[in-house]
Image (spheres, rainbow, N blue to C red):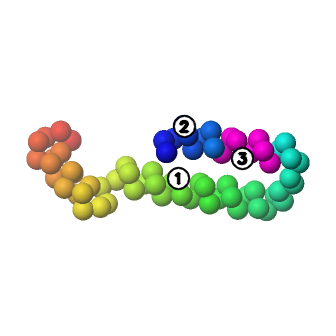
Amino acid sequence: MDKASITRLVALVVSLVGYFGINVPSNVQELLVFIVFTVVSAYGFWKNNYISQKGKKQKEVIEREGLK
């Protein structure tokens, strides 16, 4: 699944919840927002930093080639 598919899926779920009139308590909404924010932040941190072994090797190649 790509980013656009995930966005469409979330929009569909939100639309269906609104259409059927399901009332979600605000504390549950806040918890879901917190979870999504945490997961997206952790993913972004992982992808944009040289943390894994593969990332460390990539950083070495970039520095060796003088690209950074």
The crowd level at tag 1 (other Cα within 10 Å; few <14, some 14-19, many 20+) is few
Disc 3 is placed on an element classified as helix
Name the residue type under label 3: Val
The crowd level at tag 2 (other Cα within 10 Å; few <14, some 14-19, many 20+) is few
Quarter residue 34 falls in: bottom right
| Residue to which mark 2 is pinned | 4
- Please provide percent x and percent y for residue 18: 83, 44
Magenta residue span: 10-17
Name the residue type under label 2: Ala
Q: Which mark is residue 61?
A: none
| Residue to which mark 3 is pinned | 13
- At 59% across and 54% down in the image, what residue appears? 37
Measure the alpha-carbon separation of dots 3 and 1: 19 Å
Q: Is residue 60 magenta?
A: no
Name the side, left or right, on which 50 lies relative to 14: left
Measure the alpha-carbon separation of dots 2 and 1: 15 Å
- At 68% across and 41% down in the image, what residue appears? 11
Measure the alpha-carbon separation of dots 2 and 3: 14 Å
In front of the other: label 2 or label 1? 2
Name the side, left or right, on which 24 lies relative to 50: right
- At 11% across and 47% down in the image, what residue appears? 64
Q: Is residue 11 magenta?
A: yes
Name the side, left or right, on which 31 lies relative to 50: right
- Dot 2 or dot 3: first in sequence order is 2
- Dot 2 or dot 1: first in sequence order is 2
| Residue to which mark 1 is pinned | 40
Could you tell me what secondary structure mostly forms the magenta stretch?
A: helix
Out of 7 and 20, give the one closest to the viewer: 20
Out of 45 and 32, give the one closest to the viewer: 32
Q: Quadrant of the C terminus?
A: top left
- Dot 3 or dot 1: first in sequence order is 3
